[in-house]
């Protein structure tokens, strides 16, 4: 039982639409029904083929793993067996080194001993030189010299590999398959060899392939097919190895010809397997073996690992009979179902979608800034719940916007106080210079006798110089006021500025205050590309971070305060880094510094809004990231802006 009422309505609607769709398709597209049935049959057959291919490939993988494990096991046996002749070489080499024997005599005795050794499982010990000449070979009375010793190219390749890697394995196939192991005895530049036939591994693999045939035969015979075709597998030689029809088993498709094309079935089928994988052809029937006029469809796939072809056939006539039956069963109901479905769908959709459309329109209004909208929809299902939640969401958003505006206002008011302090620092030196200039003019006016031409000329020259200086200082004061006034203007659109422009603007505002506190500023600009930002907002963020560092230096009385500012470009981001050596922040405070009203400063000095508003500006207005990380002797703020 479905508890959700809207889901119940949806399920009902889907049932009506599906019924109407089936009726409309069968009434208006009867010619396509045959194709649909054929496609369904094709899907069914492809699933069967995929199952056979999957099973075959899994078994093949197991065979491959079995062969690898068996070969690895034999390789280890050969390695262990080589220890015996190797020890003989080592013993006689030692005697030669001790000068008990000369080298030729030592080698002769080694060859003699190795020739007398017996290796089980029809294997051999042997010794060859780098030219693949046989120096020693162990044979019993019934054994013959292995054929690979006559294959010079094989041995030369193996000796080359053994010399590079100290040892080497090779597989030689003649009348028997043999696994060969060579080990390089470096002091005499000779190769110790061990070999063993591995034909029994191939026998086991063939046995497992036979078991696979039996399994696939069982699967194919168990298939419940609606058509009168058959499924079968044949190999690259053309022999049918698995089939539903036991009569076809072991028949060679190369010997069966299609009278209509005069081509054998093997060539036709294999060509289809490597191209379209589907073939339409004409064939006879069991009840009419003389006439090759009945349309058949062949689906065929190729298994490269096993070199098998998996095929299924079906008579088109049988597929048409199925589609005709289907048409007759539901044709009489199609028109009625279609009309009812259309009427019910129209009424149902009109009623169901009306409140959703209303909510959508109100949501669009809210996204444009109209938070006065409220939903009056009331119902006892999910739409009613959605309406209530929509109203709650709008009220929450409206409240949050008001709170954010209040915090922005508080933050800007706090910054205005800081700006006044910065202006005072900026103006202190120019105002002092203007005062000095006026005092100098007063003194000069008393020093010179203005009624004398020479004195008057000297006084006017000095006066002009000082007035020019005063004019420069007044221009500087005016520019400073303009800069701070521009800072407080709200950006409505982004500006394209160089990455360092907001940094330099912030430094220009706070420079005098930093200099007065002996705070050193280092710049490492690795990138100065243009970027679109709200310039004043970004200046505000940088200024907040710099002011925090300045306050921290003063509060902690840092002896050599320093701020390092860097810029860089990564794959998809620009980064502005601001790092100080102010001792950092306690670990438990670091996750909280971006929370509103949280401050590490003394209560009278901090509002706890600066970093919060900075994070809002970077992450919400610029869709970037503002991160803070403790570094050695300080803290690093990173402003990350996405390209």
Image (cartoon, helix red, strand yellow):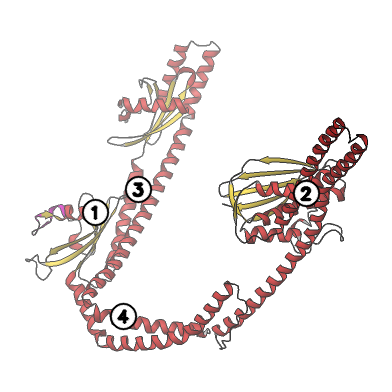
Horizontal arrangement in the rendering, residue 377 relative to residue 404 (left or right): left
User: Is the residue marked by circle 3 packed among few (<14), some (14-19), or many (20+) residues within 10 Å?
Assistant: some
Comes first in the chain, label 3 or label 1: 3
User: Is the residue marked by circle 2 packed among few (<14), some (14-19), or many (20+) residues within 10 Å?
Assistant: some
**Which residue is under mark 3?**
204
- The span from disc 3 to disc 4 (Cα, nearest Å) is 55 Å
Q: Quadrant of residue 456?
A: top right
Q: In terms of depth relative to the viewer, which is nearer, 630 or 310?
A: 630
- Tell me, yes or no, if residue 146 can be seen here: no
Comes first in the chain, label 4 or label 2: 4
- The span from disc 3 to disc 1 (Cα, nearest Å) is 34 Å
Comes first in the chain, label 3 or label 2: 3
Q: Mark 4 vs mark 2: give the one in front.
A: 2
Q: Write the start and end of the magenta stretch as one range.
A: 253-262
Comes first in the chain, label 1 or label 2: 1
Q: Mark 3 vs mark 2: give the one in front.
A: 2
Q: In terms of depth relative to the viewer, which is nearer, 217 or 552?
A: 552
């Amino acid at each position: 039982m479905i508890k959700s009422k809207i889901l119940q309505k949806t399920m009902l609607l889907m049932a009506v639409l599906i019924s109407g769709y089936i009726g409309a398709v069968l009434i208006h597209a009867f010619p396509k029904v045959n194709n649909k049935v054929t496609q369904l049959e094709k899907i069914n057959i492809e699933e069967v083929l995929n199952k056979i291919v999957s099973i075959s490939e899994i078994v093949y993988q197991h065979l491959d793993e079995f062969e690898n494990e068996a070969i690895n096991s034999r390789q280890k046996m050969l390695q262990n067996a080589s220890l015996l002749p190797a020890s003989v070489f080592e013993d006689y080499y030692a005697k030669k080194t001790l000068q008990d024997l000369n080298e030729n005599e030592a080698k002769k005795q080694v060859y003699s001993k190795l020739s007398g050794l017996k290796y089980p499982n029809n294997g051999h010990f042997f010794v060859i030189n780098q030219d693949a000449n046989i120096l020693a070979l162990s044979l019993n009375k019934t054994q013959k010299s292995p054929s690979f010793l006559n294959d010079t190219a094989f041995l030369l390749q193996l000796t080359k590999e053994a010399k590079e890697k100290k040892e080497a394995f090779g597989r030689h196939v003649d009348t028997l398959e043999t696994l060969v192991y060579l080990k390089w005895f470096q002091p005499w530049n000779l190769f110790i060899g061990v070999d063993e036939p591995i034909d029994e591994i191939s026998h086991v693999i063939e046995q497992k392939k036979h078991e696979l045939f039996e399994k696939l035969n069982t699967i194919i015979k168990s298939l419940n097919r609606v058509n009168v075709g058959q499924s079968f597998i044949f190999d690259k030689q053309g022999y049918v190895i698995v089939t539903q029809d036991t009569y076809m088993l072991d028949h060679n498709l190369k010997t069966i010809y299609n009278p209509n094309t005069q081509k054998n079935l093997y060539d036709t089928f294999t060509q289809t397997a490597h191209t379209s994988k589907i073939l339409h052809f004409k064939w006879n029937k069991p009840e009419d073996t003389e006439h090759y006029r009945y349309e058949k469809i062949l689906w065929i796939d190729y298994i490269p690992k096993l070199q098998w072809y998996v095929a299924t056939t079906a008579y088109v006539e049988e597929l048409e009979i199925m589609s005709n039956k289907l048409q007759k069963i539901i044709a009489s109901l199609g028109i009625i179902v279609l009309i009812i479905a259309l009427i019910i769908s129209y009424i149902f959709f009109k009623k169901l979608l009306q409140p959703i459309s209303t909510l959508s329109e109100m949501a669009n209004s809210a996204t444009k800034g109209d938070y006065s909208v409220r939903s009056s929809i009331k119902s006892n299902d999910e739409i009613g719940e959605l309406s209530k939640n929509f109203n709650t969401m709008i009220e929450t958003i409206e409240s949050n916007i008001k709170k954010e505006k209040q915090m922005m206002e508080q933050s800007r008011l706090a910054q205005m106080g800081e700006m006044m302090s910065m202006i005072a620092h900026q103006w202190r030196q120019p105002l002092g210079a203007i005062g000095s200039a006026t005092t100098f003019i007063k003194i000069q006016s008393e020093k010179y006798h203005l009624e004398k031409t020479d004195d008057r000329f000297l006084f006017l020259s000095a006066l002009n110089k000082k007035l020019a200086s005063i004019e420069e200082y007044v221009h500087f004061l005016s520019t400073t006021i303009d800069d701070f006034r521009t800072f407080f203007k709200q950006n409505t659109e982004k500006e394209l500025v160089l990455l360092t422009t907001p940094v330099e603007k912030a430094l220009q505002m706070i420079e005098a205050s930093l200099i007065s506190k002996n705070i050193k500023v280092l710049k490492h600009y690795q990138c100065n590309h243009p970027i679109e930002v709200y310039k004043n907002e970004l200046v505000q963020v940088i200024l907040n971070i710099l002011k925090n560092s300045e306050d921290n230096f003063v509060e902690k009385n840092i002896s050599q305060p320093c701020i390092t500012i860097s810029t860089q470009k990564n794959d998809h981001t620009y980064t502005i880094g601001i790092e100080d050596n102010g001792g950092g922040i306690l670990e438990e405070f670091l996750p909280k510094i971006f929370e509103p009203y949280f401050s590490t400063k003394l209560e009278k000095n901090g509002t706890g809004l600066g970093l919060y508003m900075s994070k809002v500006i970077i992450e919400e207005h610029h869709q970037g990231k503002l991160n803070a990380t403790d570094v050695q002797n300080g803290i690093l703020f990173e402003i990350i802006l996405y390209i």
